[in-house]
Image (cartoon, rainbow, N blue to C red):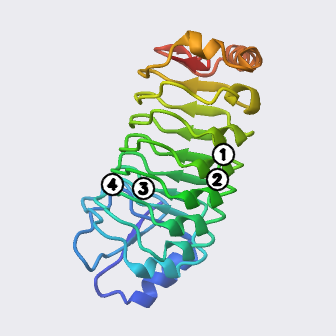
Amino acid sequence: MGCFVSKSSDSKASRIARWKSTGIVAMRDSKLKGKNVMFVDSYFIDNLMLLVLDIPMEICKLINMQRLVLADNLIERLPMNLGKLQSLKVLTLDGNRVTNLPSELGLLVRLERLSISGNLLISLPETIGSLRNLSLLNVSNNKLSSLPESIGSCYSLEELQANGNSIDELPTSICNLVHLKSLCLDNNNVHQIPQTLLKDCKALQNISLHDNPISMDQFQQMEGYHEFETRRKKKFDKQIDSNVMISSKGLDEGIDL
């Protein structure tokens, strides 16, 4: 599918009309520079030599937009009126320079996938707990030292990726995530995880804790470990049966410490 790059002669109204008609604004690798940012609206954007520095406030007029992709740019902050994008289901901000997320993020109640890896985040807002439909959260490769207690209210969360941060322990509320299937915390400072995590998160099949100061002995002594092992092996057996998840590293067995 082709893409359309807005001309400088385009009116603001015509650009907004195009965004509304597609329902998608994508600016991956876009390279648009300066204060008066031109926009790229398309389903697929590739290999454009422009960089987005700021997201203009006008973008929040697109109240019917469902997907916003702004990966691999130079964005440092998000507009404070972000919460007006009430229809947004996918927000991708990987590879930018964002240092914090506005509390208005919690107003995006329909959001299902939030990926903001490779930024400069030092914390997540407590309002993230309002994202009850969120199934994927990727905050890998930031500067986080902790996850907010409110994350336990993201009841639909199935996959949490927080590799490459400085997290030393997890909030006890993470045990409320009964739909959580995958928890990835490689390259952190995690020395312990909530003792009832394996017991309470009954859907959990995969935990990855490479390069953390936590031992397999600690993990095996946790309540619910044997039940977790049963789920893990069941997943592993299914992978063998269907010949999936095979790579040069072999099969992913669901637990890495």
Q: Tell me if residue 66 can be seen.
A: no
**10 Å neighbourhood of mark 4: few (<14), some, or many (≥20)?**
many
Separation of marks 3 and 2 at Cα, in angstroms: 16 Å
Question: What residue did someone put label 2 on?
Answer: 134
Mark 3 and mark 4 residues within 8 Å of each other at the beta carbon:
yes
- Sequence-first disc among 1 and 2: 2
| Image coordinates for residue 87, horizontal then vertical, percent | 63, 70
Residue that mark 1 sits on: 157
Q: Secondary structure at mark 2?
A: loop
Instruction: Let me know if residue 24 appears in the view.
Output: yes
SS label for mark 1:
loop
Element type at mark 4:
loop
Please give the name of the residue rendered at 71% of the width and 20% of the height, measured from the top-left corner: 235
The span from disc 1 to disc 2 (Cα, nearest Å) is 5 Å
**Residue receiving disc 4:** 96
Q: Nearer the viewer, residue 181 or 101?
A: 101
Q: Which residue is mark 3?
A: 93
Q: Seen in the image, is 163 located left or right of residue 207?
A: left
Mark with earlier residue (1, 3): 3
Q: Residue at x 64, y 12 (%)?
A: 220
Q: Mark 1 or mark 4: which comes first in sequence?
A: 4
Q: Percent position (x, y) of residue 46?
A: 36, 54
Q: Are marks 1 and 2 in contact (CB under 8 Å)?
A: yes
Residue 132, percent across and down? 69, 56
Q: Nearer the viewer, residue 29 or 171?
A: 171
Q: Amino acid at mark 2?
A: Leu
